[in-house]
Image (cartoon, rainbow, N blue to C red):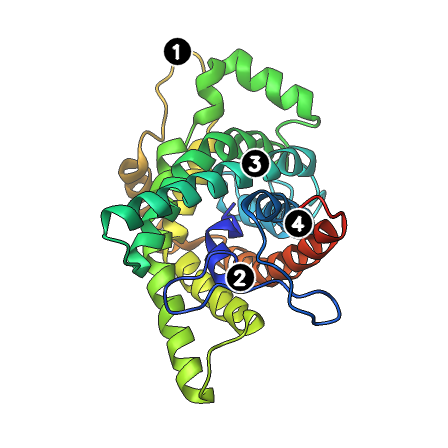
Amino acid sequence: KQQPFRLQSSFGINPPQSAPRSRHRSTTGTPMAEAPFTLALIAGGCAGTSVDVALHPLDTLRTRLQSQEGFFKSGGFRGVYRGILSATLGSAPGAAAFFSTYETMKQVIKANAGGTEHWTHHAGASSCGEVAACLVRVPTAVVTQNMQVGRYSTLTEAISSTYRANGLGGFYAGYGTTVAREIPFAFIQFPIYEAFKKTWSAWQGKETNPVQGAACGSVAGAIAGGITTPLDVAKTRIMLEKTVEGEAKRYVGTVQTLRIIATEEGAAALFKGLVPRVTWITIGGFIFFGAYEQATSLLWRTKVW
């Protein structure tokens, strides 16, 4: 699943250099203090969970389209909420891992760059955040995707069966491919996002507002998501491979997996699940933005910060 957290800069949480850091507004439109890190972390976790829950059916369709067994053998349109519990449980921790690492690395990179900022710094920090977040997201995805294709009916069955078959390592099948998908995604998305914002600002004669920034981020993410779909297909195949004792794994490594799929199924197979993947990222961006703003507003009212 392509998480929307790397687009947090697009949603006013950590804007790149060209956009001033936004201040949260209450529901009445009154400017409020800038959200502190812990508040933004909690709000981001709530927003990310909202996206995962709301769009889980789309993610299920994407997984089934990309599976080796084929869409209908993997469940078709039936039971599209399978695996939603594991996806929900891993959402907030994944966001926390990404957000904390991203913020830390952003400051480190900025300090080493003499205090200047550039979109490559944000893309680099985002990539580091993904490496950390995938430590949480990959085990979650392995369990979720195997449930989505109907291999297991309950969360406990999925966890126990995965552990018995491959030990702890089984939960990290596809980790390298997942990271290999996220890093190019960030370096494709950020410059497109910057170009969209710059063009929009020039057209209207003023800086883009947070909603316009969210639109730019969603479209840029959709483009990056489309381009990196082959890596997503490879990741899904590796995670869903059912190993048989005594037999070698069929999918070993990103490049080898891509080569097998292209050779046996044609180059078009590398883009299976493109539509639900791109749709998930596009709609998810706006859901994340709205949920983040609402969560931030509610958290401010607690007066803890």
Q: Which of disc 2 and disc 1 is earlier in sequence?
A: 2
Residue appearing at x 54%, y 11% in the figure = 164
Q: Are marks 3 and 4 in contact (CB under 8 Å)?
A: no
For marks 2 and 3, the one nearer the N-term is 2
> Which residue in the structure is indicated by mark 3?
145
Q: Amino acid at mark 4?
A: Pro
In the image, which is nearer the foreground, mark 3 or mark 1? 3
Question: Between disc 3 and disc 1, whose residue precedes?
Answer: 3
Q: Are marks 3 and 1 in contact (CB under 8 Å)?
A: no
Q: Mark 1 to mark 4: distance in Å? A: 35 Å
Amino acid on which the number 2 mark rests in the picture? Phe
* Neighbourhood count class around disc 3 (C-alpha, 10 Å): few under 14, some 14–19, many 20 upward: many
Marks 1 and 2, how far apart at CA:
49 Å
Q: Helix, strand, or loop for circle 3?
A: helix
Which residue does the numbered mark 4 point to in the structure image?
Answer: 57
2 or 3: mark nearer the eye: 2
Q: Which amino acid is tagged 1?
A: Gly
CB atoms of marks 1 and 4 within 8 Å: no
Q: Nearer the viewer, mark 1 or mark 4?
A: 4
Secondary structure of residue under mark 2:
helix
Which residue, given by chain and number where applicable, does mark 1 sit on?
Answer: 246
Image quarter for residue 122?
A: bottom left
Using the image, tell me which numbered label, if any, was put on residue 11: 2
SS of the residue under disc 1: loop
